[in-house]
Image (cartoon, rainbow, N blue to C red):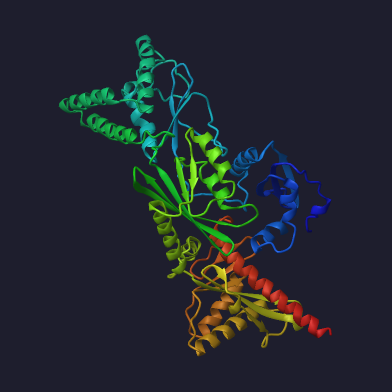
Amino acid sequence: MTFNIKKTTIPSHPGIYLMKDSNGKIIYIGKAKNLKNRVRSYFVKNQNYKTQKLVEKISDVEFVLTDNESEAFLLESNMIKQYRPVYNIELKDQQRYTYLRLTNEKYPRLLVARRTRAGKFLGDGKIFGPFTQGSSKLLTIGSLRKAFQIRICKRLPKKACLEYHLGNCEAPCQFKDAQDRYEKHVSNLESVLKGRDPQLFVKKLESEMIDASERLQFERAREIRDTLQRLGSLGTRQKMENVRDSDEEYFGARTIEQSVLVMTFRKTNGVIRDSNKFSFDLVGDNSFSNFLHQYYTTNQIPPNIIVNEMPENARLLEQLFSKKSNHQVKILSPAAGKRKEMIDLILRNIDVIQSKGSDPALIEIKERLRLHEIPKTIECFDISNHGIDYAVGSMSRFVNGRPDKSGYRKFRIKTITGRDDFAMINEIVKRRYLRLDSKKAQLPDLVLIDGGKGQLSAALSALQSLGLKIPCASLAKENEEIYIPSQKEPIIISKTSQALKILQFARDEAHRFGVAYNRALRKIKHK
């Protein structure tokens, strides 16, 4: 049942809106300066295909008012992280920095700091970090605790435990002198975690390593050596949330059909240190502006963010980023100079990806379906069966992940009587590729069938009868399971994956095209 927006009272205030499906699950969260104007705009004609699919699933809309647009930005970001709606931008590949926590106990413990989806730290005590990937966990798991004689027991025991006898803890639970020294141990540990000069501690460890070696305690000497190496890694990471004035990040964004491909270069001390690629659908309010805001919820914010085109609400983003990072942030779109050359380089990289068909989603399809080649051309078949006289077949054609409507085909069923979808699939697949093979025309990289194992077997039988070896898969609508010939169990791809969305789009287009043809035949019959 279609949601009736006319019967819904919508406030004309800033805030966020939560769109829900028939099960009450939040499927999209958006923000607006004027909720009434924005939400009603979804229910007018001429929306793109992906937004139409969103609107079809809406059963309810909930509103949360804010005082201004800035608050709406922040609330939207936190709510997206909490509920992870399927139609919102979700950046799974973002680097997440590790934080450490010294508990607020009489004799503190050192733990990895855990956070909620909204970014709030769990537990009490002091937080240290962020640390670069890997270094902190290696230190936390044993080396720092042992080096600083920090206890690991969740509850303070009544007498010394095994850690004391192994030399990893001085047992403040039992010995008065250990209790007196514990505060000093914690103070030394804090100094290292805060990035203060650790040389005194390093020299102490080096002395202990030499002493252990002379005593033939080689295992202890090796352990101290590993600790020194990890402390060196720790020392290189002490950027915290501070960045140099020369640090900047570059973003190139290209809109292709109803999706956006984004590539980033991060420049630190004049050198490109990192590069990454992301893509998202243009559904609802999803935009480059939203992408930037989501991206910098878990990435360090540099003083300069360089883009190929200015995002919406650029000044508002600058204010939010400046407040969060405690330094001034500027978003720039250069017209000339070295920065413009860097942006042009990113855009050339994106163009190369597109021209080669190496879209990340197509690469994922290749890997998940165990194909030998990237499926630049996908042809998808469906049967529209409304009575014996109106059974038809249809085929959509996608090139580089986008519809090629001039290549769509429709079929009248000629050799099958009755309701036999398997046989009909066999017929239309055979007719399609017999024609292409006889003309020596280029075959697709992947044949996709709407259905399950039975439909897939019917299509494979048709291809085998023609002596053709075209990769083939089927997409079952009920649970969006993918079947391939080489394995019994279906392949499950995340519903937020761009790879699955391309396959679904191809399937939905074949279905839409077939239903339209079926409807046209029935109209002609009844005239």
Q: Residue furthest top?
A: 176
Q: Is residue 504 above or below residue 308?
A: below
- The quadrant the C terminus occupies is bottom right
Left or right: 199 with respect to 396?
Answer: left
Which residue is at a point 42% across and 62% down the rendered structure image?
A: 348
Residue 394 occupies quadrant: bottom right
Residue 272 x, y percent position in the rendering: 36, 49
**Which is more toward the observer, 246 or 477?**
246
Residue 94 x, y percent position in the rendering: 48, 47
Which residue is at a point 72% across and 80% down the rendered structure image?
A: 391
Q: Is residue 55 above or below residue 218?
A: below
Residue 97 x, y percent position in the rendering: 44, 39
Q: Residue furthest left?
A: 214
Residue 504 occupies quadrant: bottom right
- The quadrant the N terminus occupies is bottom right
Q: Is residue 320 above or below residue 494?
A: above
Q: Residue furthest bottom?
A: 438
Residue 413 x, y percent position in the rendering: 68, 84
Which residue is at a point 73% across and 55% down the rendered structure image?
A: 41
**Which is more toward the observer, 242 or 517?**
242
Q: Is residue 522 above or below residue 257?
A: below
Residue 491 in view (yes/no): no
